[in-house]
Amino acid sequence: MWALLALLFTLTFLLWSWWKKSVRLPSANFPNGPIGLPLFGYLSILTEKNILVALDKAHDQYGEVMSVNIGPGPRTVVTGDYQVLKEVFKDDKATPRPADQMWFHKEFRFGDDATGARGILFSQGEEWHEQRRFALRRLRDFGLGKSSMEELIQEEIQQLCALLEKEVNHPLKMDLIYNLSVVNALWTLITGSRLPLHDPHIKELVHKIDELVKERGTGKLLLIFPWLRHLIPERIGWSKQKRIFANLFAFLDKVIEEHREHFARNKEVVKESPNDFIDAYLAKVDDSSPGSSFYGEQGLKSLKIALLDLLLAGMETTSTALSWITLYMIRYPEVQAKVQNEVLTQVGRSRLVSLEDRANMPYTEAVIQEVMRISCNVPLSVLHSAQADIHVGSHRIPRGTSIIQNLHRVMSNPRIFAEPAKFRPDRFLDSEGKCYVKNDHNIPFSIGRRDCLGKSLARAELFLFFSTIMQRFSFESVHADLSKINMEPIVNFAQTPPPFEVIIKRLK
């Protein structure tokens, strides 16, 4: 009996000591925050349906720069202050990814404790620099930011409009409507070939990527208690994630293998004039020396993960933003009418909308920016980690601390965006409503050296898709009473609109 009590006392004391260590502030000037519960951390993160609501409560009490315990781990800094984000991410001190996520990268990104993960999104140090530089340079070579890329996008828009033309005058579910077209433009850069929208392979790819993003976003318990994957893998969603990744990798392996066979037969020709991103990557692998992240087997692994990263980043955020734009157009038909009037005045009906038209279409650009602000597609961006002590304002963020960018908080700051919960495109116009006015605090693509790799492509696609569709169609709600339209977001990794239907009308 006494031995059992002594054991219980000892265990309780050890748990209490561990808990005190995990919740205490590492230093006097470390950002303050709520005291987390043993094992569970800041409980609202688990109990609130919307994690952004939980973080808003903590921000309201502890300020725009604060810290929370996420599960049993040490405190994570969360900042929703633009100036602090700008300072923290101005150099490489906060570019790494947290080490406590390595269990995931070992499984799906060929990661290891010494060198981190492969690919672009979660690689570290010199490997990240190498991979990002190469991706940006080569994507530009194949059209990113050039008129040829605009032509690719316009071709996809034409195909989408042909599809929408068949759906006029009856309710249409806006589920994955934009994803196929958005990913196809990127797919052409990556593989050198375009797939028709009805192709089963591109449909399968889109569904798997969408499924992966949704599954990753809903797995709160898995992210906080990763050891549960060994006990209840099916119930925690781990088994499903493994199946999704396996299917995606099988798809990518086939594409890569086809390119490798072509490369082996035509090596000198491909090196001299690569046809697409995969060709260029294989040429880089072939020319690389030991020590490079492109060398040998590691280079081939990095290629596969780089393709996954490009597709994830390139498809999900842009297609989600277009879905949000559509939802806001049916909720605010007067805004839609103003956009259509501007498109028809500046472009007319006889030609395609061009990126050169953007400068003459301030209201259309303001609507896009306001939807991006209020919907905030990726509200918490991707976790970062301090690789050295960071001093910002009165705060010190010690080396090894995980950092969350609360972009949602930045873009709903009432001191910068008056009445932030209201949809007001005119906040991005001058006092006369004639010129678009950029606001630096509107950062849907994050900030700093590790911001979104494909933001220029995303901006081009959003403008061209939206304005061209408005040139030809109107979106109407299935509800006579527009106040019945559900605008409540579904918050996973991305903040997506709820399922909704529209009635498409030809623009008269």
Image (spheres, rainbow, N blue to C red):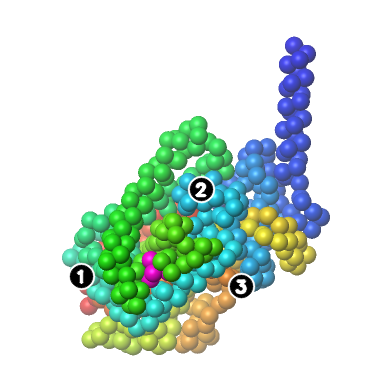
Query: In the image, is residue 283 part of the stretch drawn in magenta?
Result: yes
Q: Residues within 10 Å of mark 3 (few under 14, many from 20)?
A: few
Magenta region: which residues? 280-284
* Residue at x-position 30% and y-position 79%: 151
The picture quadrant where one finds residue 483 is bottom left
Quadrant location of the C terminus? bottom left
Depth check: 351 or 128 in front?
128
Task: Residue 213 in the image: state x and y as whole percent.
Answer: 42, 53
**Residue 80: x and y, percent?**
63, 63
Give 191 or 170, whichever is nearer the viewer: 191
Residue 505 appears in the picture as rendered? no
Answer left or right for 402 relative to 425. right
Callout 2 amino acid: Lys
Q: Picture coordinates of residue 388 (x, y %)?
A: 71, 61
The amino acid at mark 3 is Ile
Examine the structure image and report whether residue 299 is included in the region drawn in magenta. Answer: no
Q: Nearer the viewer, mark 2 or mark 1?
A: 2
Say if residue 249 shows up in the picture: yes
Q: Which residue is mark 1?
A: 162
Q: In screen coordinates, is 27 left or right of 217?
A: right
Quarter of image, res 200: bottom left
Disc 3 marks which residue?
A: 416
- What amino acid type should be assigned to the residue bearing mark 1? Ala
Q: Main secondary structure of the magenta part?
A: helix
